Image (tube, rainbow, N blue to C red):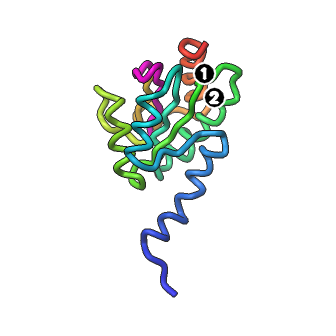
């Protein structure tokens, strides 16, 4: 029995999805879910643009997980998966203007407005601990 490419990719990326959802981060899989959750969010919301790349695995997801152990954290936690949930990701990126598309990336929004953004180039050359520190500083500033 052969496996379709889509099925193979789904199986391959599931652990990458789980690495965020097990920390209470809600996946937004459709543009409608993005609009419903981001546009109507009150308070603070973390939005992680997840991806299959090495820097997502080595720095982004572990950095987010570490930051979420902080006492002060966003009210809501969301993620979209670039390259997998393409329409949801495109919709989510509309809230990240004026920044260009970047995967992975991490956004902090307050009442739907972007207040802090970590782009891919700020993830690639930094450790998970450095990313966690950056996020914790933003949480302390915007989430109290």
Identify the residue shown where x is 44% and y is 76%: 4
Tell me the distance, in whole angstroms, between the alpha carbons under discs 1 and 2.
6 Å
Q: Magenta span covers which residues? A: 104-115
Q: Is residue 49 above or below residue 95?
A: below
Q: Of residues 52 and 113, which is closer to you in this image? A: 113
Element class at badge 1: helix
Q: Quadrant of the C terminus?
A: top right
Q: Of residues 52 and 123, which is closer to you in this image? A: 52
Magenta region, main secondary structure: strand
Identify the residue shown where x is 64% and y is 39%: 24
Q: Is residue 39 left or right of residue 18?
A: left
Identify the residue shown where x is 60% and y is 21%: 136
Q: Is residue 24 above or below residue 2?
A: above
Element class at badge 2: helix
Tell me residue 69's x, y (percent).
70, 29
Q: Does 125 lie within the magenta span? A: no
Q: Which mark is residue 136?
A: 1
Disc 2 target residue = 67
Specify few, some or many for label 2: CA neighbours under 10 Å numbering under 14, 14-19, or 20 or more: many
1 and 2 marks in contact (CB < 8 Å): yes
Q: Quadrant of residue 135?
A: top right
Q: Is residue 23 above or below residue 98?
A: below
Q: Is residue 81 left or right of residue 22?
A: left
Tell me residue 105's x, y (percent).
44, 36
Specify few, some or many for label 1: CA neighbours under 10 Å numbering under 14, 14-19, or 20 or more: many
């Amino acid at each position: 029995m052969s496996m379709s490419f889509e099925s193979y990719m789904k199986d391959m990326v599931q652990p990458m999805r789980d690495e965020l959802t097990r920390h209470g981060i809600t996946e937004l899989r459709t543009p409608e879910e993005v609009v419903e959750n981001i546009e109507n969010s009150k308070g603070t919301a973390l939005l992680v643009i997840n991806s299959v790349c090495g820097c997502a695995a080595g720095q982004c997801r572990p950095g987010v997980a570490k930051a979420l152990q902080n006492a002060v954290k966003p009210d809501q936690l969301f993620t979209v998966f670039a390259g997998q949930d393409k329409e949801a990701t495109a919709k989510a990126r509309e809230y990240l203007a004026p920044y260009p598309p970047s995967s992975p990336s991490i956004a902090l929004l307050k009442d739907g407005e972007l207040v802090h953004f970590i782009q891919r180039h700020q993830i690639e050359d930094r450790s998970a601990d450095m990313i966690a520190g950056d996020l914790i500083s933003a949480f302390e500033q915007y989430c109290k």
